[in-house]
Structure formats: structure tokens, C-alpha cells
Image (cartoon, rainbow, N blue to C red):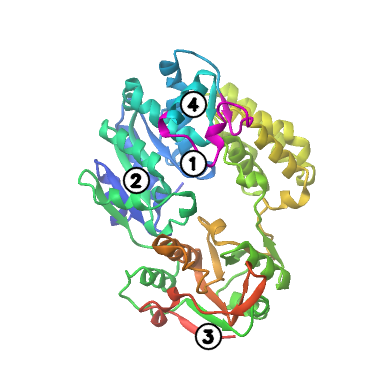
Amino acid sequence: MKIRQPTDEQNRIIGHDGNIVVTAKPGSGKTYTIVEKIADILPGLPAHKGVIAISFTNKASDELKKRCKYRCADTKQSFFGTIDKFYISQIIIPFASHFTGKVTEFEIVDRVHPESRFSPLFMESREAPSFENELLMEGLSEGKIFLDYTGKTALYLLSRVPGVLCYLKAKYSHIIIDEYQDCGNIQDEIFLKLIENGITGIAIGDINQAIYGFTQRFPTYLAALTKRSDFTHFELSRNHRCHPGISEYSLCLLGGSRIIPEEKRVYKVCVDGDESALARAIDHHINAIKREHNVEHNNQVAILCRTNATVSIISKYLQTPHKIFNETELDKDTSESGRFFRDLISSRFDDSVFAVDYAEQLFSEEFEPQKYRTVLRLCQHIFSSPIEELRQAENEMRELARLVCTQQITKSSVTHLHTVLNDAQQLKNYAPALDNEINLMTLHKSKGLEFNVVFHMDMYKWIIPNEYGGEEEHRQGLNLHYVGITRAKDACYIMNGSRRYRIKYNDFVFAEASPFLEQPGLAERRYDVAW
């Protein structure tokens, strides 16, 4: 595999020995830099040591581990996984007995009976923290790990069992956390405890891609790291994904661009009418836009909306073939097994993923040959099953999850898997768009994806941002707009109608443009056109 040479920015990060916080722009080669950093660290470690590499999703974690292996990095002593998987496999399960005095098998609990003494943990109005901790520890003594409280449980053990920090320091030299802008206070506190205990910390994120404020995850903690004296702040500022015209527009949106690109690739399109008129306008212009930007297939194009209501309206009136990416109950399942089932189904639909590749991501043929052979057999059965008969491979999927997941398979995830496999419409949601289909989804669902051409909807006052939400909502709206623009590699069309739909009142009103479109410098960096 050909290894490209790092940029000067990337080399400074790779070669630095201490604590690092990296703020990275979209398309700046963040994952490549992490891989090179890990490949630089591992050869200098003792044979028994590795690194902790935490990603936001299982899919991202698998991709990171795979790329490190391709880079010839010896990953067998390292941890690759999500933050919940780290809490459970590296802190809770190994050290619960040190606190409870019992050695037991654990199950992951995502709900309890209303009359259970643990029911306060699942109520909107929860008990005081001290009582909460008592319930969590009682649960551990009975072999229960509460899914929504893995972070609090891990933090409590980390604070009360001295051996945890000693164990982690002996086993790992570095902790690397990607997407740090989406960390909450517990993740941040645990990260800093490990740093204070002598593990080198590396935090990577983009403050301007923090769009999950509704889940109480804010970029505050990433920003705070950039100001700490024990961390060196680096930037990955060059966008390798987007056309310079898009990159400069997005930087100007955030107040960071001084360059007016020679070639503009952001368009503000005004259409007389509501969302139905916008859909018809896209139909009318799509072929010309594809020719202009050398786009071969419709699935290289995306329509991104702020709300599901807009997705529905656009879908109703858009004549060009398209695919809506709706959420299923399995999508909403936050358990480890739920996430695993999603990734597995998506991989089965991906023609570039083969059974042997998927198995190799899960277990090493060299170091775990027996498990690897079992997993490979299961993967071969799943990946060879016709899509229309995939429901017949449900037992193999469940068996595979039991081998792979560190947590007990939840009943709800099994139920959600069964529902998806037996519902052709839901199952199709995990398939990529066909060559002739435009991608249609919400802005939140688009994070991490990229398309040649993007049609960015819902840039209206009261929508992006929600002006009733205060300063934080304003920031979330700005970040969401930034994410939408930077999904486009070649061209971004911001679509505004003269009227818009109000879901709350089920009516249409005069549409005012979002104040984000009026920020200084943006008009000079885009084309304003009428269709």
C-alpha cells in the first residue's frame, strides 16, 4: 500500500511527544494523521504496552484499526473501540469485583420493571448523585451494568479503586480520543484523570462540527483543552476534501477567511415558492449541474435538510429518483449490540466489503485463530445470503454479536434486528443509494459523509438557527450549517424559497433568509442566483 507523505502540519503532530489537542477542519486528513501518530508511537513501546484509541462509532473504530494494520502497526496490545466499550471492558468488568467483593458475570441493562428498586435510574427526575452511585454499585454486585450509566459507573470506580489507574498506566502509554467536540463532562473528567496519572493524552476534534447540543454534548471541553498549559495545541487547517471555493466560504462563515477564491463553488439559489417549488427546481437543473461538475451518478449528490418534515415534502415532489435515509428503531438503539447490528447490516449492503475483510476487523487470525475461524464462518454465511433472504441469517448475526460484543446482547437490540430483517422497507434504509438515486437525509445524519454536490435546504430565520434557543442554539445552528456546506466536495447549492412550511402549525408562511447568509464576506464568496 502506497503511503503518502504527511504535510508539515501533520508532521508536527506526529513528531510531538507530549499531550496534544488537535483542532481539525473537515477534510484535513484527521484520520490519516491519527494513523501515522499511532504508527509512530507503537514501535517505541515495550511489548506489553499499547494505546487507547477511542472513536465515536464502531464503524469509525474498525476503520481506524484496519488502517493502522495496513500501516504495519502492531495493534495487538492496543484498545480500539467506542467510549462505552472502553468503560465496560477496561474499567467496569475488570474492577467491579474490587469494589463489590464479588466475582460475577455481567449483563447490560437498558430498562427495568417500574417497581424495581433500580427504577429511579430510569426516571426523568432522578435521585441525588450519592443515591445514584449507591444504586449503580448495588447493580454491579448483582451483575448489572446499566447502559445509560457506563460513564458514571466507570468514573466512580476510577475514583474509588486505586488499582484502576495503575492498571491502565501499566497497560497503555497514550489515550487518543477522536471527535472530542462531542464529549460530555464525564468523558472529559475521565480523560483528564488518565492524563494526570501519566498517560499521554491526544484529543482531536472540530469545535465547529459540534451539533449534538440536544444530548448535552458541547465543544466546551475541547476548547478548554486548547487553553491548558500541559497541552500543546495544533491545527489541521488545510481542507483536502472540498474545492477551495467551498473551503474559503466555510472559513469565512466562521470568521477565518481572508481570501476570495478565484472560482466560487457556493451558490445561494432563490426560488419563488415553497418546498415543492424547490424540489421542482432541483429536478429542472440537476442534469446541467451534473454536467458542469463532472458528476457521473445521482448518488454522488445529496439533499440535506434540517428537519424530517422537509425531507418528507421534498421526497413527495421530487421527480428525480432518490433515496430517503430514515431512522429505524435499530438506528436509535444505543447499546453495543444495537450498534454492531447496524454496522453489520450496512457492511452486508456494501459491495466493497467482503466476509474475510469484515472478519479480520473483528479478530486476528494470527493471535486468535479459533475465534477468527468461527467468526469467518459466520461472516461468510451472512455475506453470501441474498439480501431478500437476509432474515434467514438472523441467528448467525446474533451468534456473531455474542462473540464480538463485550456487553451482553440486549433483548431490545435483538427485537430491533428482527424487525428490520423482516421489513423490506426498513432493511432498504441500510443500503446505499443506487447510481441513479439522489441521497435525501437530514443534516445530522450527513455528518461524516461527503458528496460531490450538495443541495442545502432550510436556511431560514427561525430554522437555522432557532432564534428562541439562545446563544447555545445559535452556535449549534452555525455548526450545523458549517457541517452541511463542508459535506460538498465540488459544489454547494443553498436553496431558499419565498415561502416555507411550518410543521407546528401545518401551514406555509413568508420565508426570511437565515441571518447566517448575511454575515460579512459571504456574498463575495458565492454566487446569488434565481431559478
Say which of marks 1 and 2 sits in front: 2
Of marks 1 and 2, which one's residue comes earlier in the chain? 1
Q: Which residues are magenta?
A: 107-130
Q: Amino acid at mark 3?
A: Val
Of helix, strand and loop, which one carries label 1?
helix
Which residue position holds label 4? 135
Q: Amino acid at mark 4?
A: Leu
Give me the C-alpha separation between circle 2 and circle 4: 32 Å
Estimate how packed mark 2 is, as few (under 14), some (14 to 19) or many (20 or more) residues with alpha carbons within 10 Å.
Answer: many
Estimate how packed mark 3 is, as few (under 14), some (14 to 19) or many (20 or more) residues with alpha carbons within 10 Å.
Answer: few
Residue 61: mark: 1
Which residue position holds label 2? 203
Give me the C-alpha separation between circle 1 and circle 3: 42 Å
Q: Amino acid at mark 2?
A: Ala
Asked if disc 3 and disc 2 are in contact, CB closer than 8 Å, the reply is no
The image quadrant where one finds the C terminus is bottom right
Of helix, strand and loop, which one carries label 3?
strand
Residue 191: x and y, percent?
34, 38
Residue sitting farthest toward the left: 229
Which residue position holds label 3? 529
Q: Is residue 15 left or right of residue 502?
A: left
